[in-house]
Image (spheres, rainbow, N blue to C red):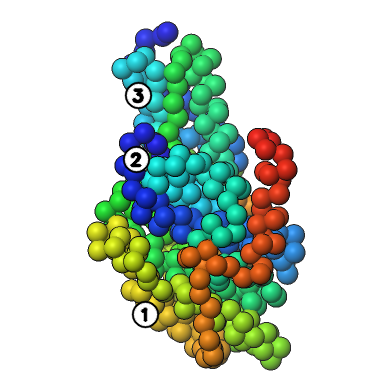
Amino acid sequence: MSSSETAVDTRVGQYALRLGDDALVLAQRTGEWIAMAPELEEDLALGNLALDLLGQARSLLTYAGQADGSGRSEDDLAYFRDEREFRNCQLVELANGNFGATMARLFVFASYQYELYSRLVDSADQTLAAIAAKALKEVAYHRDHTGAWVIRLGDGTEESHLRMQAGLDAIWPYVRELFESDDLVTELAAAGIAVDPADLDGPTLTHVRAVLHEATLDEPEAASHHSGGRRGIHTEQMGYLLAELQHLARSHPGAQW
Amino acid sequence: MVTTTAQSLRDLVADVPDPEIPVLTIEDLGILRDVRSTPDGGIEVDITPTYSGCPAMDAIRDDITQRLVDAGHERIRVRLILAPAWTTGWISDDGRRKLAEFGIAPPSGAAPHRSGPVTLTLSVRCPRCGSPDTRELSRFGSTACKALWRCNQCREPFDHFKAL
């Protein structure tokens, strides 16, 4: 993408930052499975899935730094912001848990991203539309693949069913945050630039429920819902993730491969 | 500085190989979108990634720059463009033939999000023995753009370039 022609709009920058942080943090989490997955094929799958997310994060963060007029690069944004400056939802930062919990989180998030990007392709902002068109094809594979695991484990043995259900229960209190609106997204959605997350609730959950049904799993009923990521409020697990993500770049500024 | 036509500029960089599938060029893959000279005597090259996170893009960018520098050009700018999004439909017929010869089944059928609620997969032909009796082992393979398959006939595993 060319930087010179980008118009400065701090709101667009903030919006791109949210989407980019979601992708970056989930890429980092998912990468933790590399060399640890239950089978070799899944190791490759999770590595590829994380790489797709990282690619999306790079495009979105590069654009965020241009659109907000700060001139910060993707690396500046990934490595040199502190926890409270990250705008990702809390769902993506949670520790992986077991394989069932990992698949529950990835599946719900891919289902959300699928609905998000399939609408963002029509954004009045051409860069966001282009990133979305690219990412949509990738997350379609993520949604299919993780959904297949949810069904395989949910409708598998008694033990796999129990673990899959427990994983789903564990992440469910963090799902509603995906669909929260605020002034920023409402304004940008009215201008045809952003997608209002509130509009994604129905279509995302329709798909999730269909897969849960096939997987013989119950939709959890969360007693309470967590929120705050978009305002920089994160769970305890976020600090550890950032420490691992940022330590090299901060300890050796300017280091190159 | 060297004066050249747009086509000869394109010819200079068109056969840069893909670092992960070296039998294919960036032209075969449809990664190379445009090559043009700029008013200041420089050259602009547009490339587009297969996947957002494709790690080959940096190497391809360096290789293109090197080709043009070696040919005596300067002020070279390689731009990464995202729109329109790359699709396996841009892989040339020649590219498909080379993929199959290299042992990678070329893409077939539509990407999953274009199908209905039931995902249908068209049969993928084994690049080794030609049998259509094959099955998908994993949707994700050795690189982002490939899936892992196995032939039920000759029992060999093989890569399949995913439809995107």
Along the viewing direction, whichever of A100 and B129 lies nearer the viewer: A100
User: What is the three-letter code of the residue carrying label 3?
Assistant: Arg
Q: Residue at x 58, y 34 (%)?
A: B59
Name the residue: 41% across, 28% down. Answer: B45
> Amino acid type of disc 2?
Thr
Secondary structure of the residue carrying tag 1 is helix
Q: In the image, is residue B160 above or below residue B101?
A: below
In the image, which disc is placed on residue A202? 1
Q: Residue furthest left?
A: A191
The CA span between labels 2 and 1 is 34 Å
Q: Residue A6 has which mark?
A: 2
Image quadrant holding the N terminus of chain A, namely top left
Can residue B145 be seen? no
* Residue at 60 percent of width and 73 percent of height: A103
Question: Helix, strand, or loop for circle 3?
Answer: strand
**Cα distance, mark 3 to mark 1?**
47 Å
**Which chain letter matches label 1?**
A
Foreground disc of the pair 3, 2:
2
Residue B119 vs residue B135, the one in the foreground: B119
Image vertical order of residue A19 relative to residue A227, above or below? above
Kindly identify which residue carries mark 3: B36
**Pointer 3 chain:** B
Mark nearer the viewer, 3 or 1:
1
